Image (cartoon, coloured by chain):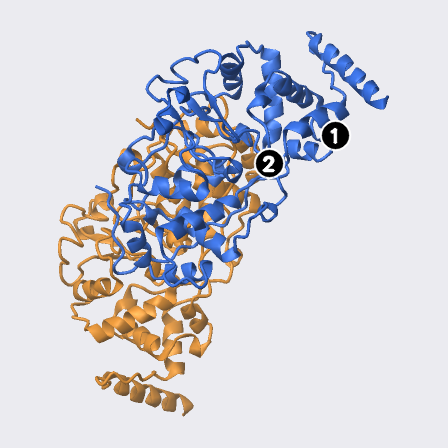
Chain colours: A blue, B orange
Amino acid sequence: MSRLLLVGAAVLAVTAAACSGNQQVTAPAADDLMKAAQAQFKPLPASYKDIPGNTASEDLIALGAMLYHDPRLSASHALSCAACHNIGLGGGDDASTSVGHKWQLGGRNAPTVLNATFNFAQFWDGRAKDLTEQAGGPIVNPVEMASPPEHIVEQLKSIPGYADAFAKAFPGQKDPISAQNVSIAIAAFETTLITPNAPFDQYLNGKADALNPVQKEGLKLFMDKGCAACHNGINIGGGMYAKFGAVAAPDAKYRPVADKGRMAVTKDPADEYVYKVPTLRNVALTAPYFHTGSAWDLKEAIKVMGKAQLGQDINDDETGKIAAFLETLTGDQPKVLVPILPPSGPDTTRPQRD
Amino acid sequence: MSRLLLVGAAVLAVTAAACSGNQQVTAPAADDLMKAAQAQFKPLPASYKDIPGNTASEDLIALGAMLYHDPRLSASHALSCAACHNIGLGGGDDASTSVGHKWQLGGRNAPTVLNATFNFAQFWDGRAKDLTEQAGGPIVNPVEMASPPEHIVEQLKSIPGYADAFAKAFPGQKDPISAQNVSIAIAAFETTLITPNAPFDQYLNGKADALNPVQKEGLKLFMDKGCAACHNGINIGGGMYAKFGAVAAPDAKYRPVADKGRMAVTKDPADEYVYKVPTLRNVALTAPYFHTGSAWDLKEAIKVMGKAQLGQDINDDETGKIAAFLETLTGDQPKVLVPILPPSGPDTTRPQRD
């Protein structure tokens, strides 16, 4: 009975919202909206220590933080993971594509490292199954950090201070400085880069007034229009693949013909223009958007997605409300100390810059 | 009487040291050596808050930390102050010269930012009188961050979150986002980047066993041979100019003919190859050495300096001891949180990368 009443209230609220051409803000019934949201999304844990299965030691994380910030993993010694995945810039680099070795520009937008641990696969095309598999990629990619693969271990062994850091991070291992352990350590550090306590997390945890009425309308639109069909779960995305242009091909500015997306990985024509659905957490901090980094404005991105994925023209009012909701996905940003790196040794390969 | 006895003991100790061709390590009389050191050098304060005249507020320093790490002060948005003055790498970039805009290489080695506040002038050629005057230079240098000068203020004003940060840092100012205030804030942050508590500081503060016997011998050699004639004071350097090659021209590898040093600033032929004497604090972390970044090995640098500045061939044994002393100049490295930067706004100029 009370349930029926609640549903009735929700219908009234929805009707009111749909008729609010006069800009009157009408919050949907909080309880039903919250329940619907809780059914589709999950809040982040308060700490990375609460991530199920996470057993990384402090020593392993500390080593990972060092490696993540160490430009000597690049051929030039001028680029580290942090160069393109800047923890201070929402975990990305505020650019369409990134600067790599000798100023080569990357092919796709640098995805945020924040909460990346919750993605079901890594890279835009999902070609790495997890952060450990991902972490080694850019280090050896000739367009990015451009380290010769065989060189990474030799390089780290030549920096005396790393011997102790690896020994502590991988206790009991005879020869812990290995490419695989580099990736494991970086992934362990990246797993700490989560952003809990966003207003939307507070809302999912039951705090009804964590979202204001406009943001709640945005949330409702986000679910009702179908955005949440792909952007759902703990990472509000990051849990599936989808074709960019599921309903209508977006402008080539956003989806150039030549980048076939996941098809390049699977060779399956059904995967043409298929990409991993990106997380929307901290999306207000991570412009520009899309794999091309071609939309600088969040509202522009919402409209492009409405058309391309849902076949809908999302009007300005709705777009503003959805954007207001998306801004509630900005959580507490990580507190990371700039790691002090061990100095190079006499045999450390010198930077290759020209 | 007791003073005479001490001097006598020192003479004995020196004689013993001079005769120690058999590698026997003989510590000079601690008291006299310590007094001689205390007369030529000064320990760092324990905290930047103890630096005389330093009145920077926490808000000003926090703003400076943001600006120091914000790549949007560069035309490409790929380079920040921290790119070449990496706090994790001894305040430099572990390279002969730095990567700038579109992969241009800088003309001189990036000097360490650590303890730079104690230098009597900034840049290798002293062309900036202090950190505030220095801080703006690389931002607009076309070879470095390459921002058009008129653009910096416009850029920061376009990033909404900076309005509040500048207002807090410069209370009472009507229009606080200015190029001058950018420099003031960065300089205030840099002033916090000091490295107290090095073994040598402890020694200067009276802890006789903070240096081991070999390090003490190195200190004595450093003073007796004349290194301390230039590398003295609180920063073990950074307090005067000197010609690189005061006695004998170093190899062109270390001192290329074309870079005339301070002469390019003053137009005075007497300033040919004259540079600011660099600080030796944390020198074990700041290879490669010289304005050219051409010596990767500290011992190599010591020998080059002995020949060029003092006309002496410093032998391997002495060089090792001086290097052992120089390693006692490594202090506690700064603890700096990666600053969280405010997101770009709709009018923020986009990165110029190609």
Q: Quadrant of residue A80?
A: top left
Q: Are marks 2 and 1 in contact (CB under 8 Å)?
A: no
Residue at the spot 32% in from the left edge and 41% down from the top edge: A145
Q: Mark 2: give few (<14), some (14-19) or many (20+) Cα within 10 Å.
A: some
Mark seen at residue A331: 2
Q: In the image, is B95 to the left or to the right of A35? A: left
**x and y percentages locating residue A120 in the rendered image:** 50, 35
Q: Is residue B280 visible?
A: no
**x and y percentages locating residue A206 in the rendered image:** 73, 34
Residue type at mark 2 is: Gly
Q: Nearer the viewer, residue B185 or B87?
A: B87
Q: CA distance from mark 2 to mark 1?
A: 17 Å
Q: Nearer the viewer, residue A12 or A86?
A: A12
Residue at the spot 29% in from the left edge and 32% down from the top edge: A104
- Parent chain of label 2: A
Compared with A197, B297 (above or below) is below
Residue type at mark 1 is: Ala
Compared with A79, A313 (above or below) is above
**x and y percentages locating residue A108 in the rendered image:** 38, 28
**As drawn, which residue projects farthest toward the right?**
A1
Q: Which residue is mark 1?
A: A208
Compared with B58, A29 (above or below) is above
Looking at the rendered image, the quarter that the C terminus of chain A falls into is top left
Q: Quadrant of residue A203?
A: top right
Q: Nearer the viewer, residue B116 or A97?
A: A97
